[in-house]
Amino acid sequence: MKREDPFMLANYRFLPARLKEKVNRFINLLDQPYRDFASKRYAQGKSMAVVAEEMGYAERSLYTFREKVITLWMLYCDHERFETHKQRMIAMIRRHSPISHSRLLMNMNLKRSGLSIDDFLDLIEILVATGVIDRVLVSRDNGKLARVYYYRGDSQHEFVNSLSCYDKTAIHL
């Protein structure tokens, strides 16, 4: 199975400086032989035959290098994508703290951002587990519990005082 080179790597020389820096950061994370291959193949734009000759490998053996670099690039891009969404979520919770689960979900605009609902829930679990945000279950007038998130930097006193806008009857931790 032949995989195509990722767009940003294959078109390195045409990228703006900011995106070139992102590719360079990725290349610097690789082990030495993979770094040499990626630098020669993508940053310098050399063909597979020339890279093989310079590195002292048979051209066919470089396809394993290429597959590994492509796989790592896809993982690297996913990590960056989730990091961006995580920062967006933290900024939104910080700005609107406390914020209900439904309002946070609506403001994140999953369809436009490309996040699935499972990714959204995973990100919330990660933020709660790492202690960046806190999740509190709050009882509404109809007896149902609602999830409310607040930024950990806010004090508990400020959080409880600002709950008055939600007309909650009890707080269950």
Image (cartoon, rainbow, N blue to C red):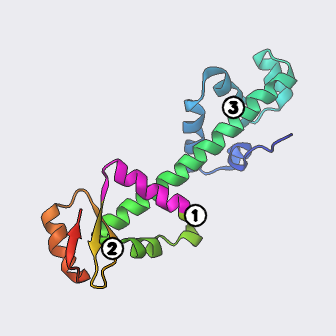
Q: Farthest residue in the front direction?
A: 143
- Residue 119 painted magenta: yes
> In the displayed structure, would residue 93 be above or below residue 18?
below
Q: Which mark is residue 145?
A: 2
Position of the C terminus, as image quadrant, is bottom left
Magenta residues span: 118-134
Tell me which amino acid carries mark 2: Leu
> Where does label 1 land, which residue?
116
Position of the N terminus, as image quadrant, is top right
Q: Residues within 10 Å of mark 2 (few under 14, many from 20)?
A: some
Residue at 86 percent across and 24 percent down: it is 59
Horizontal side of 32 relative to 60 (left or right) equals left
Tell me which amino acid carries mark 3: Ala
**Main secondary-structure element of the magenta-colored stretch:** helix
Residue 88 image offset from top left, x and y in percent: 43, 62
Q: Are marks 1 and 3 in contact (CB under 8 Å)?
A: no
